[in-house]
Amino acid sequence: MRAALPVISRTLRRAAAVAAAALALPLLAVPGANAAAAPAFAYGEALQKSLWFYEAQQSGELPDWNRVGWRGDSATDDGADVGRDLTGGWYDAGDHVKFGFPMAFSATMLAWGAVEYRDAYQSSGQLTHLLNNLRWVNDYFIKAHPSPNVLYGQVGNGGTDHAWWGPAEAMSMARPSYKIDASCGGSDLAGETAAAMAAASIVFRPTDPGYADTLVTHARQLYTFADTVRKEYSDCITDAQSYYNSWSGYTDELVWGAIWLYRATQDSTFLTKAESLYDSLGTEPQTSIKSYKWTIAWDDKSYGAYVLLHKLTGKQKYLDDANRWLDWWTVGVNGSRVAYSPGGQAVLDRWGSLRYAANTAFAALVHSDSITDATRKARYHDFAVRQIGYMLGDNPRNSSYVIGFGNNPPKNPHHRTAHGSWTDQLSSPVETRHTLYGALVGGPPDPNDAYTDKRDDYVMNEVATDYNAGFTSALARLYREYGGPPAAGFPTEETPDGPEIFVEAGVNATGANFTEIKAIIRNRSAWPARVLDDGSFRYYFTLDGATTASQITVSSAYTQCAAPTLHPAGGSTYYVSVDCSGQRIAPAGQSQHRREIQFRIASSGTWDPANDWSYRGVTTTPGATPVRVDNITLYSGGTKIWGQPPGPEEEDDTPPGRPGTPAASAITGSTARLTWSAATDNVGVSGYDVYLSDRDGGGEKAGTATGTTFDLTGLTPGTGYTAYVVARDAAGNTSPPSGSVTFTTTDEPAPTGGCTAAFKVVNSWSGGYQGEVTVKNAGTSRITGWAVSWTGSGAITQIWGGRHTTSGSSVTVRNETWNGSLAPGGTTTFGFLANGGGVVPDPITCTSEGST
């Protein structure tokens, strides 16, 4: 919950940190700096669990490889407010906002660790997990960047999100989408996202060069956008100002992004760009000395630029700036140094103190590995070992600050989904229901080694994706040097702490010929949290003596669901059914997690509830608090999720009926659509399996459908196919095959080239305008270049995404080297600034220049 404290300016925070450092500096030595013999930590286990934490932060529809058993799909409508799919990515911290700025920084730092120490991920068995998580977040960045000058930088409103305390899967609030574009830019956000995607492209290059190329394309476009439309993103996405305001400006991200694009492409123009902007980076007050009394974090990347520019160029000025910064963190500079606790923690700032030390430790390791000065090489290395060791348990408390790792780790992070509250209360339940493995907590806020494991203390117990980023990369480097195995059999499956969705009941009132029951459906689900919106329950009772069903009446004086209805269960057993379909019963609040129904069963004949199946276990004193009752059955749709019916449960061994013969339509050279009439089942059909064979035989399962339509793709042109479907029910019973349909795909047309261009005026002002042109490959074969031409509409003064030439009033724009290749149906966009009134030219032509 990042907004709970007042926003403090970066200047004030730095001043406080420097003042504390000065007070703590009678001795310029690093406490416990001699780390030649590393503590016996299982660095592989810490690395393994730190990566797992990112899977606990996933938003959207979870992938099959997600290993967090208590997480489920969430925020699956993100982007719907702007007509885009913005699902995916990472929740920021213990909240559920997707803040793009720190998310991109986290992704860059994770990728940086793999760029430097890929072999450590490989040898520890964590490379696949790293690649999975980097692809997950970069897939989100791709979605968030639908065109060159548009980047969605936040989903979810900070205030609305932070006002609610519950699991991600049960969210119901509106989640607005926020963007930067050519009319209101964000050089810091776009530059950092470019850095993240460029860095990730290096990591993916050895195993998936096509994906790496895609990332580089987006990174180039984003960097051009960042450099062209210069503005601080938080001036445009104003909701971010209270959480991730751009205090340091955007020059550091322009340098940082250019560095990573140079590393990804080896295009020297990016290195030249980084070096030309470097001199504009921030300095210490009233000096020309580059800033050194802070560190690399989500806001300021200057310090990472010092290290990487020295590594890439070997130039002395970058070495001097990197050394000065890391000296301030170790032995001090001119009588000033970061504050240290008696136990050896370097404390830069109160909020998330360990994340600053972790980020610095990682950069110190990279710098140590790239310099030749033996004294500094050891100094920076040993500082990093000491700081990471402090986090893993080498501290006066002899306690780990990494959840689920080491001795006496934290158990109560400020994290909504891990806590698992169903009442919208930070204090209920008392115990955190899940172990958030690998999460680095904020740690001691002051240089005194004092820490309290309290959920409501977000300064000490916040966790976040940026907290773990440099930490994870540092662990990879230390594993490479010292080893320490990953945990065998990790992760283990959690056991729920009790029933999750159930029914409570008690007697409301009783008489000689009636019983009135108060029943409460409760949803305390957390493995994972889930919404019950199709619930119903059954209360079973027995007709006594000669009583008939016609003598029974059911009624309700109060219900939050539908009115009760009477149904036979077999013999003299009947049940009252209450349907709560349409009610959203979710672990989301005091009233949201429950529904209450009071119903009365009355008899004009004999009445004795004592022998009623569902009466067993209810509280029988009228007005007493209802208790959980096993003999009331609760259903989600047609699936029983709680309770036992009377007698042995009958196993469903009845298969569905045969579905209708499918019909094939919309047939092309590679696709076809199948439709069929539904099958029937005694309980309900849960889905259909679609089988397909070509003229050579060998029928195989083509896919599954929950409805009665299935789209076949990847077919071969001019080929005959036979298809049929099989119905399934929830018990796994399958129907006889449907009848078969035979069809032939069309012959593939000869490849054609050609492209189209759509011209749009994005913004205009007196004497000028901003234009945007989308180029589309309208043919059936890949084109390798294109040229767009028009006449009039003013002289271009600046362009991105293309190269232009003019002849009189005629303009021709050709592709850049990186966006000329377009697959059939593929698009790319270039933009420009021009003089004039911004009239859309007619005609505008597009010519393909080469095809494959």
Image (spheres, rainbow, N blue to C red):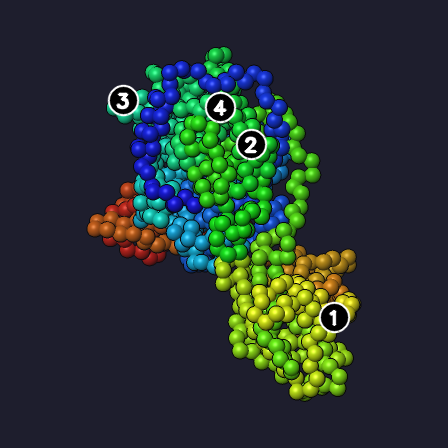
Vertical placement of residue 421 versus 302, above or below: below
Tag 3: amino acid: Thr
Depth check, mark 3 against mark 2: the one in front is: 2
Q: In the figure, is residue 346 to the left or right of 47?
A: left
Q: What is the crowding at mark 3: few (fewer than 14 residues within 10 Å), some, or many (at least 20)?
A: few
Q: Secondary structure at mark 4?
A: loop
Q: In the figure, is residue 399 to the left or right of 192?
A: right
Distance from the alpha carbon under mark 3 to that under mark 1: 83 Å
Distance from the alpha carbon under mark 3 to that under mark 2: 40 Å
Residue pointed to by mark 3: 287
Q: Earlier in the sequence, mark 3 or mark 1?
A: 3
Distance from the alpha carbon under mark 2 to that under mark 1: 51 Å
Vertical placement of residue 670 versus 832, above or below: below
Q: Earlier in the sequence, mark 3 or mark 4?
A: 3
Tag 2: amino acid: Ser
Residue pointed to by mark 4: 343
Splitting the image into 4 quarters, where does residue 325 fall? Answer: top left
Residue sitting at the far top: 374
Tag 1: amino acid: Pro
Residue pointed to by mark 1: 646
Q: Secondary structure at mark 3?
A: loop
